[in-house]
Amino acid sequence: MAKVKTTVYVDEDVLRQIRVAAARRGRTVSELVEDALRRATLSGLIESIRSRSDLSEAEALELADSELHAMRRERDQPAA
C-alpha cells in the first residue's frame, strides 16, 4: 500500500513522548503514529460490528482481528 505524506497538529508533549517511544523501540515516529491510527480504526470497527449484530465483545474482536489479518495477507502478496 502506498504511503501518503500528511500533516497533523499535536501537542508538543505528545510529540515528545512519541519520539521517545519510537527511539526506545527502534521504530520511526511514522510507524508508531500509523500503528496508533490502525488501533483506533480497529477499535471503531469492533464497536461498529457490535452495534450492528448480536455478537459479544469477544466475538466482535475475533471477527475484526480475523479481517485485519486477511487484509494484511492480501496486502503482502506479491503483485501478479
Image (spheres, helix red, strand yellow):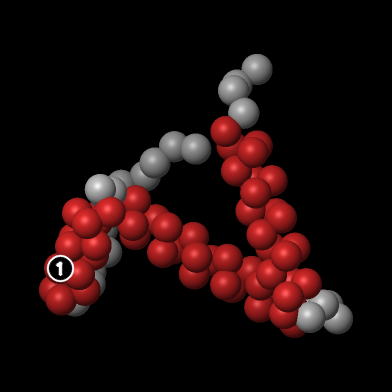
- Secondary element type, mark 1: helix
User: What residue is drawn where x is 57% and y is 72%?
Assistant: 43
Rendering quarter of residue 41: bottom right
Farthest residue in the right direction?
Answer: 54
Q: In this view, does 33 lie above or below 77?
A: below
* Closer-to-camera residue (4/16): 16
* Closer-to-camera residue (55/24): 24
Residue 22 point in image, percent of width and height: 24, 56
Q: In this view, does 65 lie above or below 16?
A: above
**Residue ID for mark 1:** 16
The answer to whether residue 47 is left or right of residue 59 is: left
Q: Is residue 67 above or below residue 62?
A: above
- Give the amino acid type for the residue marked by disc 1 in the picture: Arg
Q: In this view, does 49 lie above or below 25?
A: below
Label 1 CA crowd tier, 10 Å (few <14, some 14–19, many 20+)? few
User: What residue is drawn where x is 70% and y is 54%?
Assistant: 67
Farthest residue in the front direction?
Answer: 24
Q: Work out which quarter of the rendered image holds the C terminus and state it.
A: top right
User: What residue is drawn where x is 66% and y is 78%?
Assistant: 47
Residue 6 seen in the current view: no
Rendering quarter of residue 50: bottom right
Residue 29 point in image, percent of width and height: 25, 54
* Closer-to-camera residue (40/19): 19
The answer to whether residue 42 is left or right of residue 47 is: left
Farthest residue in the top direction?
Answer: 80
Rendering quarter of residue 60: bottom right
Residue 39 seen in the current view: yes
The answer to whether residue 49 is left or right of residue 18 is: right
Residue 3 point in image, percent of width and height: 39, 41
